Every structure is written in structure tokens, then in C-alpha cells.
């Protein structure tokens, strides 16, 4: 590859070739002492398949699985530019799979739908910041699920973990440690020989040199180069998301690491060793709501077969034909009273609906529960259950029933649920379940949320409603007065036993 594009760092002459190679492959720099940042990268088994395919001059499909830092037109875009410059004869195709505000739990569940069905050759995984509040054991299980799903479906795909950084994590890096989330991910990377890159190391180097300031508010002006009046690069405005200049620092780090990653290892299929965690998320998947769900038809074993096959294929509606496979026609079910109640309580949003547009292109089909008592029911065999929906100012609260018993009461509403925004948000029941068959019911409750108290903690006063906000009830509705549930599907670690169905509240007499 052209040295002008990807240049291997030079080492002092007195270091032996073997020592230089060892330092290169672990991302260390000579002279690093106690308290120095963690290694900038670890090559491990490298990215030999991606390199071989790129040198062959064909199509190379590069997937980017992550959160909002990956969603930005920053390091992701720069990485593609670097690869295209390094391998001009190859055709690099991007598989965009970034969902803001989500971590490796949702990443593992949506992997088949958003990444694997597109058959990636190279997968970058970025969840260090959004996994910051999770237990190490959970992170390991979820990240391992991503690895095992990928190599079970595409043994020739190479994987690279990249670790972004927020303000709290940055202090750990300056102290010479991996932050807890990336430390957990490193255990998975080491077990499977996956290369990793710690983006925060270069940020820490520049901070120590006085050429970068980690955070500056919007009131501090920056020049066209992203630097403040003292000539220091402003890395972030909100302590998490890099500025354009900050993203270039991330890209610089990856560009420096790529030669070692690409030149390490022998091309060939990746073997799956014994799992690191017995509760890993290899069986994680997203089961979306089929168009037939609101017919009120009971799901059967025939539904489960169709749902499982569709989910494995990565279709956007995991059980779209389940009722047909079960021998139940929509027309016949549509005449039932259950179908009438379900149709009145639920509405599927059209792709051009304003709320659907706010959810973004990565959102599965969206259903909205309009009436308290509206519910979604689903049967599966497995150990974990959750939902994926949209958060917004018009959210209500819901109750999760597992095997007929109330298990949890929650909401997708949070202090970021402001009018005019409806991003995707996952919710998981916090406890593991026995690996057996379960029936789950998610029901919209009538009880209201104290939204004013939640927003007050974020410094937002909602005493004056927002009359021009658009919600699922239509334009002109007071945004915070809404009391709805946006539902895209169920998140499981296991296998579906039925297609989801939607029901309405029981009629009162």
C-alpha cells in the first residue's frame, strides 16, 4: 500500500527490529513510563482478510456499528477515505449501522438486520461511550454476542473494536487506565484475537502537550481549523461528541494504527473458540411487528417457524407472513371484535409520517399505541427480553408482564425527550430469565408520568406547552400532554415461538 497514505511509525535506531515490531503491534511508544496512557492499539490477529480482498481489487464492504459518534459524518467518513486512498483499485462500500444513544445490547440484537444481511468484509464496532453505565459482565456478554454472530454468519469478516471517549473516561485514560467499558471489551478482543484501537490516547497526548483542550462551551469561539484563540484544538463542545476537528484526531489515530492491523495475520476463516461468557448474546435478535399483528389473530407454532426464518434472513418485518403460514387469513381475522379493538388502539406510522422521519432511516417499522390498555404480546424461548421503540415528549408509561405476572413498569421518556425529537430507544427487562418458553405482554398504562419533574432535573421548564410540536396525535397537540407508546419490536436473546400480536383494551359495559 502507498506509504504516503498509511505510514508506519518510525522507531529509534537503537531499538532492535523484533522490539520495534512488538511495540508497533501493541501500539506502545518508546519511553512510556508509569501512568502513561494505555496502548493506542493492539493488532492481535489483525485484519488480513480485509487486506487480501482490498488488494484483489474487488468490492470491500465496510460496516460501522455504533452510536451517535459513529453516526456523525466524522471518523467513519474519514476512515472510508483513508481506505480508498490506500487501496485505489478496491471498491469500498459502506454499511451504515449507527443508532444514536444506543449501546452494545441493542447492537447485538439488531446486528442481523442492520449488518449481517449485507455481508460485511470488515466491521468496526464503537460502543465504549454508550456502554459506560453498564456492568462489565453485561458488556462482555453483549460484545461477545456481536463477535459470535458475525463469524457464525460470515467467517471471513474481520472485526475491529474502536474505543471513543467522553469526559469521565478521559480522566481514566490520562491516569494510564482503560475506562471500565473498554477494559471489558478488551477481554473479548483478547479472547478472539480482535484488533482494537483506543482513540482517547492521542487526545490525551495532545492535551498533555497543550495543543488540545478537551472541552470548551459554545461561547468559546473556534477558527476554521477548529482551534481556540490560544491555538488549541477544541475536541468537544458537550464533553462527549467530537467537533469536526476532534473527529480528525480520531481518524489520525486510526490511520496510524491501520498499517499494523492490515499487515498482521494470515487470511482465512475465523474459528469460533469456546465462549468467554456462558450468557453471551449470540442468540440476540430483533423481532419486528408484522403488518398482520393488529388483526387480533392468535399466533401459533406455524408463526414461530416463519418468524425464526425471517429473523435469520434479516428481514425488516421478522414475521410478516406468519399468520399466512399458520393458515389464518387477514381477511378472516379482520372481522373479529379483537381486530376491531386492536385497529382502534394501534396505528402503524407511514414512512413519510413526521414522527417516523424523526426516528431516522435505521428505525424498524413503527407502531403507536394510542389508548391505555393497548398491548403487544409475544412468545419466545430464551433468557433476555426487551423492546425497541421511540422516545419523545408524548411518551406514556407501560407495564411489562412476563408469564402472566407484572414484572416491571417503565417508560421510554427521559430528560432528553424534547418536542420534535423521536429517536430510537431500547428498553430491557433487567434480569435474566430461565432459558425456557415465556409469554410477554407490554401494555400502555393510564397512569401519567410526572414529566415536569423529569425535565426540571435537566433544567427545562415545561409549564408552557409547545403547541406547534408534531406528535402521533397530529400537529398542534401539546407535546408533553401526549400519552403514547411507540413500538418497533421485541429484543430477545433466544428464539421466537410466535409472531407478535397487538391487542386493544377490553370493552367496558
Image (cartoon, rainbow, N blue to C red):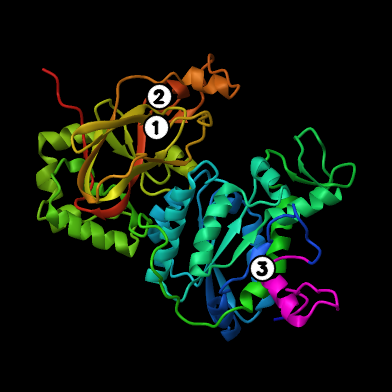
Q: Nearer the viewer, residue 182 or 445?
A: 182
Which residues fall within the magenta stretch? Answer: 2-29
Seen at 18% across and 32% down, the residue is 341
Q: Residues within 10 Å of mark 3 (few under 14, many from 20)?
A: many
Q: Earlier in the sequence, mark 3 or mark 2?
A: 3
Where is mark 3, residue-wise? 26
Residue 225 visible in the picture:
no
For residue 103, above or below residue 187: above
Q: Is residue 324 left or right of residue 406?
A: left
Is the C-beta separation of discs 2 and 1 under 8 Å?
Answer: yes
Name the residue located 71 percent from the left edge and 77 percent from the top edge: 21
Q: CA distance from mark 2 to mark 1?
A: 8 Å
Q: Which residue is mark 2?
A: 482
The residue positioned 41% from the left and 71% from the top of the image is 273
Secondary structure category for the residue under label 1? loop
Q: Is 251 positioned to the left or the right of 344 in the image?
A: right
Residue 413 visible in the displayed image: yes
* Residue to which mark 1 is pinned: 472
Amino acid at each position: 500500500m502507498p506509504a504516503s497514505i498509511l505510514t508506519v511509525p518510525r522507531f529509534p535506531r537503537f531499538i532492535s527490529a523484533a522490539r520495534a515490531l512488538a511495540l508497533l503491534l501493541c501500539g506502545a511508544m518508546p519511553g512510556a513510563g508509569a501512568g502513561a496512557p494505555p496502548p493506542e492499539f493492539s493488532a492481535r490477529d489483525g485484519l488480513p482478510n480485509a487486506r487480501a480482498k482490498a488488494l484483489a481489487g474487488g468490492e470491500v464492504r465496510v460496516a460501522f456499528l455504533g452510536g451517535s459518534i459513529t453516526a456523525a459524518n466524522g471518523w467513519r467518513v474519514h476512515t472510508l477515505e483513508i481506505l480508498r486512498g490506500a487501496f485505489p483499485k478496491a471498491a469500498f462500500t459502506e454499511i451504515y449501522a449507527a443508532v444514536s444513544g444506543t449501546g452494545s445490547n441493542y447492537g447485538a440484537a439488531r446486528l442481523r438486520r442492520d449488518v449481517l444481511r449485507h455481508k460485511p468484509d470488515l466491521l468496526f464496532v464503537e460502543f465504549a461511550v454508550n456502554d459506560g453505565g453498564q456492568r462489565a459482565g453485561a458488556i462482555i456478554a453483549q460484545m461477545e454476542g456481536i463477535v459470535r454472530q458475525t463469524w457464525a454468519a460470515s467467517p471471513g469478516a474481520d472485526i475491529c473494536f474502536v474505543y471513543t471517549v467522553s469526559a469521565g473516561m478521559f480522566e481514566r485514560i490520562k491516569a494510564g487506565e482503560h475506562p471500565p467499558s473498554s477494559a471489558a471489551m478488551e477481554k473479548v478482543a483478547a479472547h478472539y484475537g480482535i484488533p482494537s484501537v483506543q482513540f482517547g490516547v492521542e487526545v490525551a497526548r495532545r492535551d498533555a502537550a497543550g495543543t488540545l483542550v478537551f472541552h470548551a462551551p459554545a461561547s468559546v469561539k473556534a477558527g476554521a481549523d477548529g482551534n481556540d484563540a490560544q491555538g488549541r484544538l477544541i475536541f468537544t463542545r458537550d464533553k462527549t461528541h467530537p467537533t469536526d476537528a476532534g473527529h480528525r484526531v480520531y481518524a489520525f489515530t486510526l490511520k496510524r494504527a491501520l498499517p499494523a492491523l492490515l499487515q498482521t495475520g494470515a487470511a482465512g476463516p475465523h474459528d469460533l473458540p469456546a465462549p468467554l461468557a456462558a450468557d453471551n448474546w449470540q442468540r440476540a435478535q430483533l423481532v419486528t411487528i408484522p403488518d398482520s399483528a393488529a388483526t387480533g389473530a392468535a399466533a401459533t407454532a406455524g408463526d414461530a417457524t416463519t418468524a425464526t426464518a425471517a429473523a435469520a434472513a434479516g428481514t425488516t418485518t421478522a414475521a410478516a407472513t406468519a399468520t399466512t403460514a399458520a393458515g389464518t387469513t387477514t381477511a378472516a381475522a379482520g372481522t373479529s371484535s379483537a381486530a376491531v379493538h386492536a385497529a382502534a388502539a394501534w396505528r402503524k406510522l407511514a414512512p413519510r409520517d413526521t414522527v417516523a422521519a424523526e426516528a431516522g432511516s435505521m428505525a424498524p417499522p413503527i407502531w403507536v399505541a394510542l389508548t391505555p390498555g393497548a398491548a403487544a404480546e409475544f412468545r419466545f424461548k430464551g433468557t433476555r427480553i426487551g423492546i425497541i421503540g421511540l422516545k419523545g415528549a408524548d411518551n406514556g408509561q407501560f407495564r411489562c408482564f412476563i408469564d402472566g405476572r407484572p414484572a416491571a413498569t417503565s417508560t421510554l421518556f427521559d430528560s432528553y425527550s424534547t418536542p420534535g425529537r423521536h429517536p430510537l430507544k431500547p428498553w430491557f427487562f433487567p434480569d435474566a430469565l430461565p432459558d425456557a418458553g415465556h409469554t410477554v405482554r407490554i401494555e400502555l398504562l393510564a397512569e401519567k408520568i410526572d414529566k415536569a419533574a423529569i425535565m426540571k432535573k435537566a433544567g427545562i421548564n415545561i409549564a408552557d406547552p409547545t403547541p406547534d410540536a408534531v406528535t402521533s396525535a397530529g400537529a398542534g397537540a401539546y407535546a408533553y400532554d401526549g400519552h403514547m407508546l411507540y413500538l418497533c419490536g421485541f429484543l430477545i436473546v433466544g428464539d421466537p415461538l410466535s409472531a407478535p400480536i397487538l391487542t386493544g383494551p377490553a370493552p367496558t359495559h
